[in-house]
Amino acid sequence: MNLKKMIKAAAFATVTLVIGIAVIVVIKTLNHTPPSFSDVARANIQLDEAQLAANLAAAIRFKTVSFQASEGKENQEFSNLINWIIATYPKLNQALELKLVNQSMLYKWQGANAALKPILITGHYDVVPVIPGSEAKWQQPPFSGNIIDGVIWGRGALDDKSGVVGILQAVTYLLEQGFQPQRSVYLSFGHDEEIGGRNGAGAITALLREQGVQLAWSLDEGSFVFDGIFPGLETLMASINVAEKGSTTLDIVATAPGGHSSMPPQKNAVSDLAEAITKLQDNPVPGGLSGLSTVMFDNVSRYMPFTMRGLFANQWLFGPVIDRQLSASATTNAMLRTTTAPTMLSASVKTNVLPIEAIATVNFRIHPRDNVQSIEDYVTALVASDTISVRARGGINASAVSDWRAKGYTDIAQSMREVYGDIAVAPGLMIAGSDSKHYGQVADDAYRFNPFVLAAEDLTGFHGTNEKISVANFAQGVRGYIQIIRNGSEE
Ligand SMILES: [Zn+2]
């Protein structure tokens, strides 16, 4: 073969290869479509929406605030809310058995088939304080429970009195319909979730364990039906969290001889520490698309525009591009890996004294694939030297990852389609904490999800100002709880 012929043949082979790859990419993209649930029948549930709204508003008016220090707590408000629940939901209180655990409430709705594992539907009724000085920024006073133009205002409207009242309304509706669950259904309403849940969810978990109760699954707060929150997604997306991240904090300590600042050496503790922090920032904890995150993005991307679908349908080719894209955004990065956040600094006590010690405190939110020890090991290997050491402040591992193929998950997913239609449903990773860290210990699977719609503009309401929920949205969420309990309590 002469040179010309060889070049021609090589060019032909290259073109064939490129066309081949392009064809595979297009075919895979065209096949990367959402599963069809068009045959799912929409649930027809008539509710008195004004009554629902009035009840949520009433619950908001109790100042059940959890303060970090226990002295601010108004115990009477907590008792008043408990009494209000007992008085407002007589049918429920007649049919279900109530046990008070400290100021948390545990109800048991006896199932017809005692051989089946029970389920737990839970929420918390304590709320975070209103930030002092921010009261004027609220369009309606934070504990007013005012209902204006179809919107219910106040602290707890989203986190998490809508959950608590939503569950109470759902069970009441089912009782009125004469519904009898097959599995026993536990309901619990925590009073201290915002400060760790030890005396509420923690004590209830201990009690259930003592009674030998092992739950098929539990459902707690933790995520929502997202509207326009997930980048590139045009449909609603029920994001059912199946795990929550852990957290650990490390002190990076640089030591040096110190001395007077008038004759400084080339390097001192502060500059050594600065180098160590930079190194940490430049070397994020390894992560990426694997396990849970792969399933989540695979599900969600099926509802995205063609180019995005093309990327996710062809991870064999575009894997590195996707990783880079997702790592660049703070939200998606947090789902892919353990995050690194330097938060506190300290060094010399005087302007003209070289420090003998400089400390950076760094908080890591632990992805389920890592743990407290592996993060300490990773950081030590990265930054430790003659002058730099790493001190652990303690931490908590990520939760176990619950099964997104189990019946509990598919029941919740099905319920969301019955209420909201053919929407995207995907398992997710919770980047904050919840009471599920307790309940998960007595449940085969722990899911974290509220069946209400959350739009981007609602995000500032969480622990912030102008927390609110629309009456229509609240009612849809109650329908969500009704279907979840109805489907989830079946065999
Ligand atoms: Zn909450």
Image: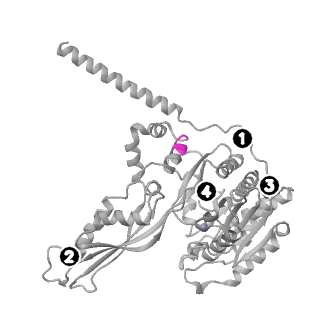
Residue corresponding to mark 2: 268
Report, in whole angstroms, how far the alpha carbon at label 1 lies from the one at label 3. Answer: 22 Å
The span from disc 3 to disc 2 (Cα, nearest Å) is 69 Å
**Residue where numbered disc 4 is placed:** 224
Q: CA distance from mark 1 to mark 2?
A: 67 Å
Q: Which of pointers 1 and 2 lies earlier in the amino acid sequence?
A: 1
Identify which residue is drawn at 68% across, 44% down: 421
Residue 182 is marked as: 3
x, y percent for residue 345: 34, 76
Q: Do the CB atoms of the residues marked 4 and 3 lie less than 8 Å apart?
A: no
Closer to the chain start, of discs 1 and 3, is 1
The residue singled out by tag 1 in the image is 40
Measured from the top left, where is residue 99 in percent x and y? 76, 74
Q: Amino acid at mark 4?
A: Phe
First of labels 3, 2 by sequence position:
3
301 part of magenta stretch: yes
Question: Which of the 4 image quarters holds residue 322?
Answer: top left
Classify the position of ligand 1 by quadrant: top left, top right, bottom left or bottom right. Answer: bottom right
